[in-house]
């Protein structure tokens, strides 16, 4: 019986090394396309919408543990908070008197400078859903998205000042890049002399940098920076940080300032997203003048 050479019991495909190489190349191409072009944003929104219930289920044990822990510590917390509130009541009484004086002086300066009053800024309260575990970016995922009125570009703030900026939105969630992330740049102004600068994230020490300054720029350690309002995305007068160090290079003729942010996103779970959708078409207002 003659054996047919074309008949094989086992069919062999490409070698495993070739398959691995093809998969790695496809992954690299997808990573480059996803980082440079918003081609996969519609698919990302659909996937995010589908996995949102599973994200909530995955966070349920953490939330349950927090509830149980807070229940056991309720008595101690209540006693501690009662003592703190008694101290704060006295401090707030003095602070209210001081703020009333500053408000009167501020209104007087506004009338002298013919500055129009700033309207109330609409804001959306959000809570941190989770923080992506990556060392290459500093992002936060919030529990509200486009269905709550959040859109890309809106600033995020806390009690200290600017926290970051919304960069991606789905119907139920939103993603914010923190002020220290390399994707964020904020137009700022020195309170002391009004000098306008640009603050960039990306410093490995968790600070913000003001770059490309002339070597003789009037920037000093301790200067407070606030948003200048230029561009319309960040309202004027939001606290950004305080300059900790100024590096001057006489060879290149440029200087750079290192700024410690005034916000503390690592301490809180709740933040405010400022709705600036109607401010992009109007001129930016000047910051409030305080003595």
Image (spheres, rainbow, N blue to C red):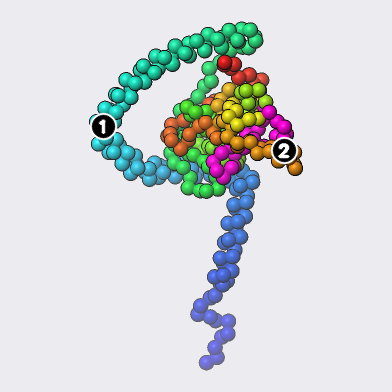
Q: Residue at x 67, y 26 (%)?
A: 195
Instruction: Specify start and end residues of the magenta stretch as a single range.
Output: 196-218
Is residue 269 inside the magenta stretch?
Answer: no
Residue 115 is situated, as x and y percent measured from the top left of the image, at 63, 12
Q: On the rendered structure, is 142 left or right of 223?
A: left
Residue for badge 1: 76
Residue 240 is situated, as x and y percent measured from the top left of the image, at 56, 30
SS of the residue under disc 1: helix
Q: Nearer the viewer, residue 228 or 127?
A: 228
Is residue 211 inside the magenta stretch?
Answer: yes
User: Which residue lies most toward the bottom here?
Assistant: 1
Between label 1 and label 2, give the one nearer the viewer. 2
Residue 34 is situated, as x and y percent measured from the top left of the image, at 60, 48
User: Quadrant location of residue 113?
Assistant: top right
Counting residues from the start of the chain, the first of labels 1 and 2 encountered is 1
Give the vertical position of 117 relative to 257 (above or below): above
Q: Residue at x 60, y 58 (%)?
A: 26
SS of the residue under disc 2: strand
User: From mark 1 to mark 2, how far is it between C-alphas?
Assistant: 54 Å
**How many residues crowd around disc 2 within 10 Å: few (fewer than 14), some, or many (20 or more)?**
some
Residue 226 is situated, as x and y percent measured from the top left of the image, at 59, 26
Q: Residue at x 26, y 32 (%)?
A: 76
Q: Quarter of the image for the C terminus: give it.
A: top right
User: Quadrant location of residue 242?
Assistant: top right
**How many residues crowd around disc 1 within 10 Å: few (fewer than 14), some, or many (20 or more)?**
few
Residue for badge 2: 254
């Amino acid at each position: 019986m003659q054996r047919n050479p074309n008949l094989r019991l086992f069919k062999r495909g490409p070698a495993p090394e070739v398959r691995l190489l093809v998969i790695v190349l496809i992954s690299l191409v997808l990573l480059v396309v996803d980082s440079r072009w918003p081609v996969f944003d519609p698919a990302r929104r659909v996937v995010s919408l589908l996995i949102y219930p599973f994200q909530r289920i995955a966070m349920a044990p953490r939330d349950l543990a927090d509830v149980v822990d807070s229940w056991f510590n309720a008595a101690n917390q209540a006693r501690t908070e009662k003592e703190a509130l008694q101290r704060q009541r006295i401090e707030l009484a003095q602070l209210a008197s001081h703020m009333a004086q500053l408000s009167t002086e501020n209104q007087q300066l506004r009338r002298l400078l013919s500055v129009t009053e700033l309207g109330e800024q609409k804001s959306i309260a959000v809570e941190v859903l989770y923080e992506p575990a990556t060392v290459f970016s500093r992002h936060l995922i919030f529990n509200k998205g486009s269905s709550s009125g959040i859109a890309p570009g809106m600033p995020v703030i806390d009690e200290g000042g600017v926290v970051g900026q919304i960069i991606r939105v789905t119907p139920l969630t939103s993603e914010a890049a923190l002020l220290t992330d390399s994707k964020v740049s904020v137009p700022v102004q020195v309170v002391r002399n009004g000098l306008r600068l640009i603050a960039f994230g990306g410093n490995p020490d968790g600070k913000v940098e003001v770059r490309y300054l002339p070597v003789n720029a009037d920037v000093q350690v301790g200067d407070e920076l606030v948003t200048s309002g230029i561009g319309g995305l960040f309202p004027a007068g939001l606290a950004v940080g305080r300059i900790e160090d100024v590096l001057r290079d006489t060879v290149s003729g440029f200087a750079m300032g290192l700024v410690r942010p005034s916000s503390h996103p690592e301490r809180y779970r709740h933040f405010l997203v400022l709705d600036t959708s109607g401010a992009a078409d109007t001129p930016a207002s000047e910051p409030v003048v305080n003595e």
